[in-house]
Image: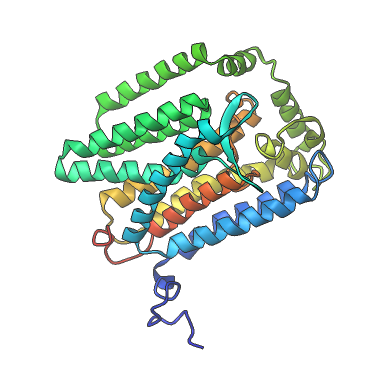
Amino acid sequence: MRNTLFRDDKSLLGSNWYILSKKLFVIPFILSFIGILAIYSLIGTEYSILLIFKHIIFLSISLLVLIFLSLLPKNNLRKILNALCFLFILLLVLVPLLGNEIKGATRWISLNYFSIQPSELLKGPLVCMFSWFCYLYVKSSNILYLILNFIIISIVILLLLIQPDVGTLLIYISVFSLILILYFRNLKLFIFLGFLGVFFLLIAYFSFDHVAYRINNFIDGNNLQVSKSLSAIKTGGIFGVGLGEGQLKYSIPESHNDFIFAILIEEFGVLFGLFVSFLYPLFFILARRSILSPSNLFIMNTIFSLCFLLCLQAFVNIGSSIKLIPPTGMNLPFISYGGSSMLSYAIIFGTVINFSKNEESTTNNT
C-alpha cells in the first residue's frame, strides 16, 4: 500500500499533509481530553454513565468533521460553509415552529435520539459568510454585498430574539462588529458600534425579564450558583481535591455546561484552570504564526474573527464561573457537554486550521 505521507500522494490526506500546520491540532485534542475528564467526573451525580458515552460519540464525530474540513481546498471549504450557513439559517427559522421550549426558551429542534441547536451550528459558517461578503465589497465596491450581509444579519437577530437567546445574540453582534472594524478600520465606526452595543444591552435589560434578573442578581451578589462556584474554586486551591472528589457538581444544576470550569478547578486546582484558560488564546497565536506565506484579507480577517469567537465564548463561560460577568449559559468550547456546540467548535477549529495552511499562495485559492 502506498504511503499516504509521500509528497506525490494525490489523496485528500496525502496532498494536504505537508501544508497543514500540525501543531494546531494539538489544542483541540487537549481540550477534548480535558472535556472527557470533566464529564467523567460528573458520573454518579444527576448524570449516569450514559452521559460519558454520548459525550465520546459527539466528540468522535466532531473530531472527524474537524479533520475533514481542515483537509479541503480553501475555496471548496468556503463554498461548503456558505451552503451550511443557509441550511442552518433555515433550521433557525424552523425552531419557533418545531422546537421544544426549555426553561422559557425555544432553541432546540428535537429529533428521535438527539436535539439540534441551530444557533450554535450557525456560528462558524455565518462568520465566514459575513467576512466573505465584506471582502467582496472591499474588492469590488459593490454595495449589494453589504446590503445582503445586513439582510442576513437582521434575519438572524430577529430569529434569536424570538427564541429568545440574548447571550448568543451578543456573541454574534460582537463578532460581526469586529469583522466590520477589521475590514473598514474606521474609528468613527468603532465608536458607533460601541454605543450601539450599549444601547442593545439596555434594550435587552428592559425587554427580557430573565436578562434583568441575571444582571440584578449579579450586581446584588445574590446568585446562588455563582456563590457555590466561587466556593468550589476556593476549595480546590492550587492543586485541587482530585478527579471525582469535588462537591460542586452535586449541588449545582447544569454543571455539565455552565459551570464545568469551576468543577475542573475544584478537582484539579487553580493552576490547571489557568492552563485551560490559556489554551484558547494560544490557539489564536499559533494560527496567526502558522501563516508563513502572504495571505489575502479574507483569510487573515476570517482567522482573526473565528479565533476571537472561540476566545470570547471561553471568556464568557469562565467569567461567569468566577463572577466577572453575569451567567449566560454559554458552553466552554470543546469541554462542556453538548452535541451541537461541539460540532460548532469543530467547524470553527477545522476552518481556522484549513485557512492557516502553509501554501505558497493563499490568494489563488480564495
Please tell me which residue lies in front, 351 or 247.
Answer: 351
Res. 271 visible in picture = yes
130 sits left or right of 244 in the view: left
Question: Dividing the image into 4 quarters, which one contains the C terminus?
Answer: bottom left
**Residue at the image position 37 percent from the left and 34 percent from the top:** 176
Colour mode?
A: rainbow
Q: Residue furthest left?
A: 141
Inspect this view and state whether residue 184 appears: no
Q: Position of residue 351 (x, y in %)?
A: 42, 54
State left or right for residue 42 relative to residue 199: right
Residue 133, horizontal then vertical, whole percent = 27, 43
Asked if residue 325 is positioned above or below residue 12 in the image, the reply reads: above
Image position of 285 with respect to 157: above or below: below
* Label tally: 0
Percent position of residue 340, x then y: 57, 45
For the residue pair 360 and 63, the one nearer the viewer reads as 63
Q: Is residue 200 left or right of residue 332?
A: left
Which residue is pictured at 29% across the width and 36% down the height? 149
Front residue of 147/114: it is 114
Q: Quadrant of residue 293?
A: bottom left
Residue 160: image x %, image y %? Answer: 47, 29
Query: Is residue 275 placed above or below 292 in the rendered structure?
Result: above
